[in-house]
Amino acid sequence: MSKRRDRNTRKRSSNFSFSSILPWFFGSLLIAGIVGYMIIRPPAVNQKTFCDEKGNIPGVTVLLIDVSDKLSNSQKARLNNELINISNTSSSRTEAVLNKGEKLVVYFVEQEGIKPSLAFSMCHPGDISKRSLLEKFSEGESFAKKKWEKFSKDTTTEIDNKISQTSSIGTSPIIETIQFIRSKEFPPPSLINENSNYNLIIWSDMIQNSEISNHFKQINDYKKVLRENPLVLNSIKISIFQLMSKKYIKYQTNKQLMWWRKVFASSKANLKLWEPL
């Protein structure tokens, strides 16, 4: 009789002990999950610019647009298309121009002596089709979609507005504008290496027209220009979309092209693309 009672007592004691630790077990799992999420969750971003609130921006792409003369309809269409596909890749474009968290800044060339005008500055919020599992868990798809749409819409709207409002200007200080952008938007040369993603994309007829060099008059000595106007573009990737014009075709020569290539080579830039449009 006593043996049966002992067995029942041990059985009840065993059941009681197991059931009593279940809340602690699941509670510990919940706490561990919350702590783990707090550690690996995506960094907080500014909801207006989508940039990391702590200033950790992994890369910068600056788009410089020269509207000293109006863009043609086909040139504007190509510009919008490039912006829409700025984060896409393919077999021929293996690296995205702009990745999530990186900043896109848009400047316009202004009259000589006037600071380049800033039209847009925002970080890429990320394509909703490429979100990680953690991002899907922490952020609803509709909210992510709105962020992506806002980024795309704001970019093209600001650029279209600026292009439509800008009248033709008498000078085109391209080198001076590049100097300003280099100083303002990119880290010091000593902090840039080949693995950094820093891009300068220029949409221009590339006819330098200012006091330091006037291609309408002559293609002068590029070495003298750089001695008087130092330019260091080490490891910054340069892409040129040259806006061809019937009005200026006699100035857009191979000699002028080679002048720019020597400028970029002497400045240690990584010239990735030169495409006439």
Image (cartoon, rainbow, N blue to C red):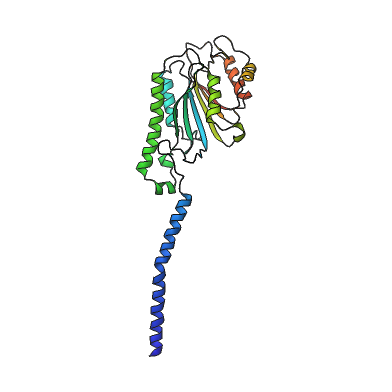
When the figure is inspected, residue 64 is found, relative to residue 96, above or below; the finding is above
What residue do we see at 39% from left, 24% from top?
Answer: 160
Looking at the image, which residue sits at the far top?
217
Point out the image quarter for the N terminus. Answer: bottom left
Q: Is residue 8 left or right of residue 207?
A: left
Q: Count of labels shown?
A: 0
Q: Quadrant of residue 30?
A: bottom left
Percent of width and height locating residue 38: 45, 51
Does residue 93 appear in this view?
A: no
Q: Is residue 220 left or right of residue 157?
A: right
Percent of width and height locating residue 83: 44, 29
Q: Quadrant of residue 256?
A: top right
Looking at the image, which residue sits at the far left?
142
Percent of width and height locating residue 70: 43, 16
When the figure is inspected, residue 262 is found, relative to residue 93, above or below; the finding is above
Percent of width and height locating residue 2: 39, 89
What residue do we see at 52% from left, 30% from top?
Answer: 185
What residue do we see at 40% from left, 79% from top?
Answer: 11
Front-most of residues 107 and 132: 107
Front-most of residues 91 and 234: 234
Front-most of residues 266 and 118: 118
